[in-house]
Image: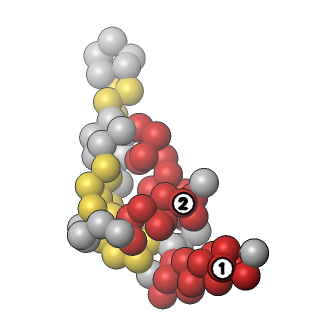
Amino acid sequence: MSMEFLRVIAEQKLPYVVHTPAEIDRVRVLRAAELVTAFIPPSSQAPDDRAIRHLAQVESITAKGKLALNKATSAFIEL
């Protein structure tokens, strides 16, 4: 699933901003894997204990991310 989302990001104009909690979590995974550089502000708590999510901004796809995309595309074509 992360590679699919990385492919979606690769098709967008950067910087790419995501808003939903699910997309922010996907960006967090890609950043942890060093496939993208991204700004993800920390979550904060509202007074009634709801988590307040902001947005995440993908700045770039790293060389490692581009290599992973190329490998995934090559594997798909070979099938």
Look at mark 2 in the image and give the residue it sits on.
Answer: 4
Q: Earlier in the sequence, mark 2 or mark 1?
A: 2
Look at mark 1 in the image and give the residue it sits on.
Answer: 77
The quarter holding residue 53 reads top left
User: Which mark is in front, 2 or 1?
Assistant: 1
Which residue is depicted at the point 37% across and 19% down? 50
Name above or below for residue 75 compared with residue 15.
below
Amino acid type of the residue tagged 1 in the rendering: Ile
Tell me if I can see residue 3 in this picture.
yes
Q: Quadrant of the N terminus?
A: bottom right
Amino acid type of the residue tagged 2 in the rendering: Glu
**Residue placed most toward the observer, 15 or 4:** 4
Left or right placement of residue 49 versus residue 47 in this view: right
**Residue placed most toward the observer, 70 or 77:** 77
How many labels were placed on the picture? 2
Residue 16 image offset from top left, x and y in percent: 27, 62
Q: How is the image coloured?
A: secondary structure
Q: Are marks 2 and 1 in contact (CB under 8 Å)?
A: no
